[in-house]
Image (tube, rainbow, N blue to C red):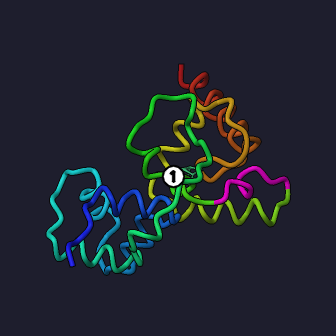
Amino acid sequence: MTAPTIDQLREFRLQEGFSLRQVGERMGVHSSTIGSWESGRYLATPERLQQYATALGWREQRRKPPRTVNRGAAAPATSWQEQAYCRGVDPQPFFSNDAVVQQYAKDLCRACSVTAECLEWALGWGAAQTGIAGGLTDEERSRLRRNLNRRVREAL
Ligand code: SF4
């Protein structure tokens, strides 16, 4: 059987809601290794592509249209947004007012490989973003923004 391409696997991973970390754990490699294959920085061998496909349970006929949280829609598309864990999962928990459900969304953020990039975006470009982003609620981000602004003023 011919191994799928890295683009096919990446698309499938996002559609199925797998993080790089989850796939890495299944394959026994670091998430950054898979990220470097997906970004084209390093070439994955056909054997590695086949292992990746097996780890994902990849089947051509299982592919389906993507669901998105629309994270970062106001900013230019960047590679971190393409790696966002929430691109392939139900967006509801990220916008819930229920503390238990919010914690579930935060746990998803903790498993995300681009949490730092997302939080940086949410504090800047995505200031108007509601719901959980970068592992924090909008209220928590506002508090963090105020603290950062205060520290900057004190340092001047
Ligand atoms: S940190 Fe959370 S909100 Fe941000 S991209 Fe990752 S999963 Fe989505």
Q: Where is residue 132 in the image (x, y as percent from the top left)?
A: 68, 49
* Quadrant in the rendering for residue 50: bottom left
110 or 2, nearer to the observer: 2
Q: Is the residue at mark 1 in contact range of ligand 1, meaning its CB lies under 8 Å from it?
A: yes
Q: Position of residue 107 (x, y in %)?
A: 63, 65
Which segment did they paint magenta? 90-97
User: Which secondary structure, mark 1?
Assistant: helix
Whether 14 is among the magenta residues is: no
Q: Where is residue 41 in the image (x, y as percent from the top left)?
A: 19, 51
Q: Where is residue 88 in the image (x, y as percent from the top left)?
A: 55, 58
Q: Is residue 57 above or below residue 87?
A: below
At horizontal 63% and vertical 27% (from top left) the residue drawn is 149
In the image, taking residue 65 as reference, residue 10 lies left or right, namely: left
Q: Which amino acid does label 1 sit on?
A: Thr
At horizontal 40% and vertical 57% (from top left) the residue drawn is 11
Mark 1 burial class by Cα count in 10 Å: few <14, some 14-19, many 20+: many
State the quadrant of the N terminus.
bottom left
Q: Name the residue under label 1.
A: 115
* Quadrant in the rendering for residue 73: top right
At horizontal 41% and vertical 78% (from top left) the residue drawn is 57
50 or 155, nearer to the observer: 50
At horizontal 60% and vertical 42% (from top left) the residue drawn is 70
